[in-house]
Amino acid sequence: MAVTFSDLHTEAGLKALEAFLAGKSYISGDKFTKDDVKVYAAVQSVPGASFPNAGKWYSSVSSKLASSFPGKAAGVGVGGAAAAAPAKEAAPAAAGDDDDDLDLFGDETEEDKKAAEEREKAKSSTKKKESGKSSVLLDVKPWDDETDMKKLEEAVRSIEMPGLFWGASKLVAVGYGIKKLSIMMTIVDDEVSVDTLIDEYLTVEPRNEYIQSCDIAAFNKI
């Protein structure tokens, strides 16, 4: 879990850091990381004797940084309300430290970039599972034998939505001079609900001027 430190130039801030470092060698555990560098940069000077944990940590970080910056610092002042103290000068440390190349400003390292690239490759190589499709035969019934079946079919085909594809159709006699429209359609299952299509599109205004009801005559997975 990310930890936030504030006002490390004040006694209250140092008290919080002191309490956090109790039983710890470094900010993120037993190993020196960029987290230590970030917090170190916010502490203006060596914590006093009343902050033994913070003081020990501060000295340890100073030693780690010294191996990466062997030159002698001349001292730099930074303006502002929370101005940093003169640049910290640390004693040389033993060679062989694993953290010789440090990124003081938290910039992305080559390893970070490589890891990000690998994640992107993994995402792009994972193909999204294609949604299933179904073939549906609808029986669309008119109000009576006087209903204009051509306009009824136009009303049906006027419905357009993602995943809906109208197919072949024909008129089928049902008796007493009345014919129904039998029409095929192909749908993408994740995008089109046949019940919604019927209840919210086909049998409501303005299409219900021609359409009395709709039934699913056949439903097959493709």
Image: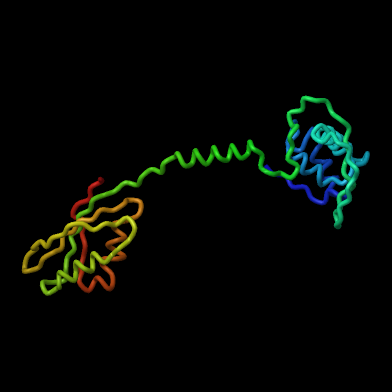
Location of residue 208 with respect to 45 vertically, above or below:
below
**Residue 214 versus residue 168: which sits nearer the camera?**
168
In percent of the image, x 84 and y 45: which residue is there? Answer: 43
Q: Is residue 147 left or right of residue 121?
A: left
Residue 185, percent across and down? 23, 56
In percent of the image, x 76 and y 38: which residue is there? Answer: 27
Q: Is residue 175 left or right of residue 41?
A: left
**Residue 51 versus residue 212: which sits nearer the camera?**
51
Residue 89, percent across and down? 89, 38
Where does the N terminus fall, quadrant-wise?
top right
Residue 34, percent across and down? 73, 39
Residue closest to the far right: 49
Question: Could you tell me if residue 23 is visible in this image?
Answer: no
Residue 92, percent across and down? 86, 30
Location of residue 104 with respect to 143 vertically, above or below:
above
Q: Is residue 82 left or right of residue 167?
A: right
In percent of the image, x 31 and y 65: which residue is there? Answer: 200
Q: Is residue 88 left or right of residue 202?
A: right
